[in-house]
Amino acid sequence: MYPLLKSLDLKDKRMIADTRKRNFVNDSRTEVLQHSEGVLAKIIEQQTAKLPSDIFLWAAGTSILAAMALKIRGRKNDALFVGQWAAPFLLLGVYNKLVKVAGSDRTDLK
């Protein structure tokens, strides 16, 4: 801790903390105004936020199982093609979760 802060009384420390909070809020509002999403991004985020997150997990698992089935049936190229769908499905699931947790709607000043 800083030596100066040790010598301050509780009232002064609270005043400093309140000033820091106000500065943080002002900085975050400035950031919001500088970095807002476009109309298309907002529409996409609104629609993808409606989907449950486990859909993407099921899609990834299904593509892996389908790839295994195709491999067993001797269709190697098809199995490779379908098996590569798992990673994009999982990435879409991560995007979906991010939209739900910290989407652009947090930046909308209402």
Image: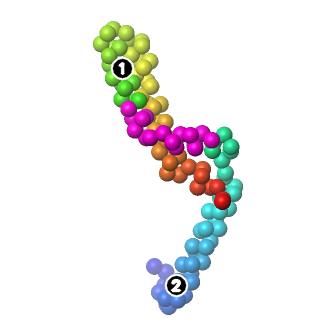
Instruction: Place residue 58 in its image quadrant.
Output: top left
Q: Count residues near mark 1 (Cα–Cα under 10 Å), then give few for <14, some for 14-19, many for 20+.
A: some
Vertical placement of residue 64 versus 2, above or below:
above
- Mark 2 lies on a secondary structure that is helix
- Give the residue drawn at x 33%, y 23%: 65
Residue 107 visible here: yes
- Which of these two is toward me, 67 or 110? 110
Instruction: Place residue 24 in its image quadrant.
Output: bottom right
Residue 4 visible here: no
Magenta region's main secondary structure?
helix
- Give the residue drawn at x 58%, y 44%: 46
**Left or right of residue 5, residue 68 in this image:** left
- Between disc 2 and disc 1, the foreground one is 1
Name the residue at the left extreme.
Answer: 72
The residue that disc 2 covers is 13
Q: Count of labels shown?
A: 2
- Mark 1 lies on a secondary structure that is helix
The residue that disc 1 covers is 66
**What colouring does the structure picture have?**
rainbow
Vertical placement of residue 96 versus 8, above or below:
above
State the image coordinates of residue 41 (x, y, percent, origin top left).
63, 42
Vertical placement of residue 35 versus 75, above or below:
below
Q: Any mark on residue 20, and which? A: none
The first of marks 2 and 1 along the sequence is: 2
Residue type marked 2:
Lys
* Residue extent of the magenta highlight: 43-58
Residue type marked 1:
Ala
